[in-house]
Amino acid sequence: MSEKTATILMKKAELLMELRDYNVEKLQKSQAKIDVTASKPDSEETVLMRIIPKSNLTNNTIGVDHVRQMKTSIEEEDFDKVIVFGNRFTSAAQKELRDEDIEFFSTKLKIVSTLDTQELYAKVIDCADELCQIQCGHIPQSEAECKGYSDTPVQCTFCDGSGRKQGRRCPVCFGTGLRQTHYSCIVRLISDNADFHFERGWARLLQNDLYAILELLSAANSKQPWITTTIEGDGEVTG
């Protein structure tokens, strides 16, 4: 098994689970595949996420025969949705997967690119609210309640209030030695950036906002990625 490919695919699967609020119910690993059974807290839908890090074809490409064998092997299972992750897929394999209504992701496809601007923005705000609850104990209901932003002038930290940097006018405060507005909270900064990017329909920058706030949320929750569990050894893990 290619551990590098496996790690890339599992990170994609983990991100998709984060975006869709999936919880791991069971995890099974073999040399050929990693199966993650997942569900949502507010739904009875059962999802199978199959990660295939290696195939017999060139460049670990998954062919139509592989897809058909997989389809046969999971037909007896009672899954409402199946999602497949692989390095790449042949055209015939892609058609077979679409015909069977099986979602698939390659190593090249960005998970967040499947979301439109509204979905990206909504997820950023949801994550910001969760971080506010974790860090401050409540979600501010108005701009005045948030202490992460201030329009009171403060000393410019870039030039230490001198207005000069390396003999030139400070490019941050423009020589005043003061910053008219400032952010003391990275969550508020990302949230405000997302507001600006959403208003202009800038999907790529919203994707960056989402990546940044998901990283903060993961750190705040001190999550232990299930990725590491799967790499360490074969077997089954039940959540």
Image (spheres, grey):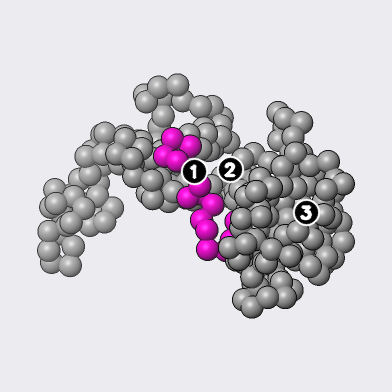
Q: Which mark is residue 71?
A: 3
**Which quarter of the picture shows residue 199?**
top left
Q: Position of residue 228 (x, y in %)?
A: 72, 61
- Does residue 93 lie above or below 18 as drawn? below
Residue sitting nearer the eye, 121 or 126: 121
Tell which tag, 3 or 1, sits nearer the viewer: 3
Q: Secondary structure at mark 3?
A: helix
Q: Position of residue 2 (x, y in %)?
A: 69, 74
Q: Which mark is residue 19?
A: 2
Q: Secondary structure at mark 2?
A: helix
Q: The magenta stretch spans which residues?
A: 105-119
- Does residue 214 lie above or below 200 as drawn? below
The disc labelled 2 sits on which kind of residue?
A: Leu
Q: Is residue 93 visible?
A: yes
Tell which tag, 1 or 2, sits nearer the viewer: 1
Q: Which mark is residue 199?
A: none
Spatial separation of the CA atoms under disc 3 and disc 1: 27 Å
Q: Earlier in the sequence, mark 3 or mark 1?
A: 3
The disc labelled 3 sits on which kind of residue?
A: Lys
Q: For the residue carrying disc 1, how many other residues have a C-alpha within 10 Å: few (<14), some (14-19), or many (20+)? A: some
Contact (Cβ within 8 Å) of mark 1 with mark 2: yes
Residue sitting nearer the eye, 25 or 30: 30
Q: Is residue 213 visible?
A: no
Residue sitting nearer the eye, 86 or 182: 86
The residue furthest top is: 141
